[in-house]
Amino acid sequence: MQGLRGRTEAGWSGEAAIYLFAALLAFGTLAWMEALHANVLVVESAADSSHFVRDGLMLLPLALAATLWGLRPHRRRGPGLPRAAAATATAFAGLLTPAAAAHIALHNADETAVAHAGPGGAIAPELAEESHGLASTLLHGVTDAMLALPVAFLLSLAALALLRRRHERAALPAAPRRRLLLTASTLVVAGAAAVVPVSGAVSPDYPKFAAPLFIPPVLTGQNIDLTMAETQQQILPGETTKMWTYNGSFPGPTIRRPTGVPTNVTITNNLPESAGSMSTHHHGAQTTEDSDGQPSDYLIPPGASKTYTYPAVDSGGAERAAPQWYHDHRDMVTGRNVWMGLAGMFIYDDPFEESLNLPKGEYDVPLMVADRQFDAGNQIPYTFLENGVFGDVILVNGVPQPFHDVGARRYRFRLYNISNKRDLRFRLSNGQSITQIGTDSGLLPEPVSRDSILLGPAERADVVIDFAGHRGETIVLENADAAFGPGERDAEVMQFRVSNEEVTDTSSPVPAALRPLPPTGPPVVTRTWNFDRTDQKWTINGKSFDPNRVDAQPTLGTTERWVFRNPTSQPHQVHVHLNDQKLVSRNGQPPPAYERLKEVWHVDPGEEVVVDIPFSDYTGKFVIHCHVLEHEDDGMMTQFRTLPASRHHSPPPSGSAKDTLSRKIRILSSKRLRRILRRGLRFEAAAPVNGATLRATMKVRGRTVGSVRRTRLSRGRVKVTLRVSRRGRARLRPLVRKRRRLRTVLKVRAGGETRRARFTIRR
Ligand code: C2O
Ligand code: CU
Ligand code: CU
C-alpha cells in the first residue's frame, strides 16, 4: 500500500484535504451522537443548528489531531486504509472521552443554569442540589466515545478512500510547518466557536406590549366538545409555533358554566399518535373518579374520545363558583403536555356572585399566565428537567407580554399561573394595590388589599383593579419575582392602557363582606405529607407515585387534618383533588386573610401548611401531588381513596377479604439495563383463576419495550420472564444513556385483573 505515505513536497491541497477530513470526522460523529441522544419524547423541533455548528467546530481540533495521528508516516510501509482509519478512529475516541465528559458536565450545569437563571442571571442555589456525580459523568463520556468509535472508523475509511483517489500523489501528512499552521488555525476556530453563545438559551426577540391581549373563545353549553390536536399558533412574530391545543387555541376555549348543573365535556384525542394517551383533569372540580382525569386510568387513547361529566355539586348543594381550569394530567408527561399547550379555563358562576354586581362581561377578564422557552425557529421543544422547566417569555392568554385597552373603571381579573415551574408575583407598576376577592376555590370571606400577589404553578387569584382616576395612563402588571431580574422581560407581564375617555361604571364597589367559608366538622384524623426528595427523586413521604398504591383512606362525611411539609430546598405546590381545603395554619401562624380556602398550596422550603379537608360526594381514588409539573412527573404524587360514609371498618384495598392470593407483582431480576437486555425481566405475578391467560407489557415513557403472554395457568403465583423486543432495545439504550434511570411500568393482565408495578431501570 502506498499513496498515504508521507511525502512533503505536495501543495496545499493535501492540507485542505486533511482539514476537510477532520471536519467530516467532527461533524459526522457529532451528528451520530446527537441522533443517539435524541429523546424520543422531546417534541421534534427545528434542529438547534447553531448549537450543532458550535459543538462541531469545538470538536475540530480533536478530529485534526486524530487525523494527523492516523495518517502519520510509517517507517516500513504506509498504513493501509483500514489501519489508518482504525488508528484515526481510536485516537479520536480517546480524545473524545474527556471532551464528552466535560461537555456533559457543562450541559448538566447548563440545563438548570440557562433555563432557570437565563443570560446574566445567577444560578438559583437550590438548583445546584441535583449535582451529577463525576464518576457517572466520566462513564457517560466513555460510553459516548465508545459509541462514536464505529462511526468515526467508517467516516475515516470513507474519507481516506476519497482522499486517496483524489490525491493519489498528494502528501499525507503535511510538512511539519504546515501541520503547525493547520493545528493553530483549527484551535483558533474552535476557540472562537467556544465563546459564541448558542441560540436556544434565549428566546427570539419581539416587541413588548405590541400585541393585543387574546381572549379565548367562550363556551357555555351543557354539552361541550373539545378536540386535542397539533396546531400552529402565532405567538412570536414570524414563524408559527407548533402546539398541542384544545379546539385550536392556546389557551383552549374558556368554559363558563353555572354551578349546580352538570356539564358534559367530550374530549377527542387527535394528537399525533406518538403523543400517547391523554387524560384531561378539570382542576378544582369535584367529580367521580372516572371523570377526574386520572394519571393512568380512564385515559383517552389516540384517536378516541371520552366524555367527562362535571356535576358541579358539593354535599348536595351547588359547588362554589370559582376560577377553575382544565389541563392534561397524564402520568409522567403532564409537564410536556401542558407545556405544549393542553390547558384552558373553566369558570363557574353562581347567583351569589351575581348578586354582588362585580364587573361582568368584557370587564371580567381571565388572564392565564405561563412562561415558555422558544428556540430560534419560534418552537417550544420540551426537555424534561426534574427540577422544573422554565421559559424566558411570559405569555398571557398565549400572547407574549400583551397590552389591553381598559376604561377608567373597575375590572375583575382572574389571574392564573399555569407555568410548569415558575412562580409569579403580580403587582402594578404604579404602586396601586390590588383587591383580592377570591382564590382557587372562589370568593374570600372578605376582600384583601394586596401590594403583590404570589401565585405558584396552578394557583389562581380573583382580583378587582380600579382604573378610575388613571385616565390616559399605562400601567404594567409586573412580576416582582423575575428570574432574570428587574427590567428583564419576565419582569413585566402585560400592560393596561387606560383610555382617556370618561366611562360610567355600572358595577358595584367590592363589598366589605364577600362569601362565608363553608362549615367543616372537627377533624377525625391527622395525616402528614412530606413533599420530599428521596434517592434523587421527588417523593411524597419518601415514595414515588404508584397507581396501585393508596396512601390514605378518608371516609366521606368526615373531615381530616392534613399537614403538608417541605423538607427540601425547592418550593412545592401541594394540590389535592376532590374537595377544597380550609387553611388551619401556616408555619404555626393563623391563616392569612387571602388564603382561607384553596386547593393548591405554595409550600416553601421548611414550611408547614395545615389544612382541614371535609371529604364529600364521591368514593374512589384521587391524587394529591405537587403542581410543579416536573416534580409531579418525577413521582411527587400519590393517591387517597375515599370510602363510603356508611362503612365502619376499612375494607381491604383490593380483592375480597377471604382471598389470600397476593395480587402484587414482584420484580425478581436485576433492574440493570444490561441484565434486562440480556436475560429479560423476571417477575412474579398472580393468576387469579384457573386457566387464566397472563399478558404483561413493559412500558418506558409510554412506549412498549417488551411483552409476554402465558396461557392456561393454574391459580396461584407464577414466575414469568419478559424479554425486551428488538424495537424496545433500540428505544431503551439511548434513553438510559441519557437519563441513567428510567421509570418503567410493568402492566400485568391476568384473569380480568390488571396490576401494575413501577420500578426504575438503571444503567
Ligand atoms: Cu391541576 Cu392534579 O392537577
Ligand atoms: Cu386538580
Ligand atoms: Cu414540587
Image: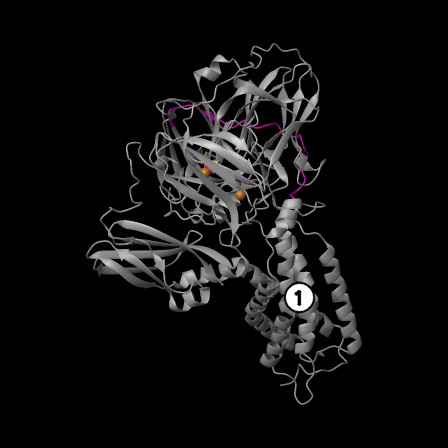
- Number of numbered labels in the structure image: 1
Q: Residues within 10 Å of mark 1 (few under 14, many from 20)?
A: some
Residue 710, quarter of picture: bottom left
- Specify the amino acid type for callout 1: Ala
- Secondary-structure class at tag 1: helix
Q: Viewer-proximal residue, 666 or 212?
A: 666
Look at 65% across and 22% down and name the residue there.
433
Residue 85: x and y in percent read 60, 76
The span picked out in magenta is 202-223
Q: Visible in this render: residue 250?
A: no
Q: Is residue 107 magenta?
A: no
Residue 467: x and y in percent read 65, 17
> Could you tell whether 392 is left or right of 693 in the image?
right
Q: Image quadrant of ligand 2?
A: top left
Q: Main secondary structure of the magenta part?
A: loop
Q: Viewer-proximal residue, 424 or 298?
A: 424
Quadrant where the N terminus sits is bottom right
**Which residue is label 1 attached to?**
23
Q: Viewer-proximal residue, 549 or 205?
A: 549
Look at 66% across and 42% down and name the residue there.
204
> Could you tell whether 750 is left or right of 526 in the image?
left
Residue 543: x and y in percent read 45, 49
Q: Viewer-proximal residue, 714 or 277?
A: 714
Residue 414: x and y in percent read 54, 25
> Outermost residue, bottom direction?
76
Relative to 183, say whether 510 is above or below.
above
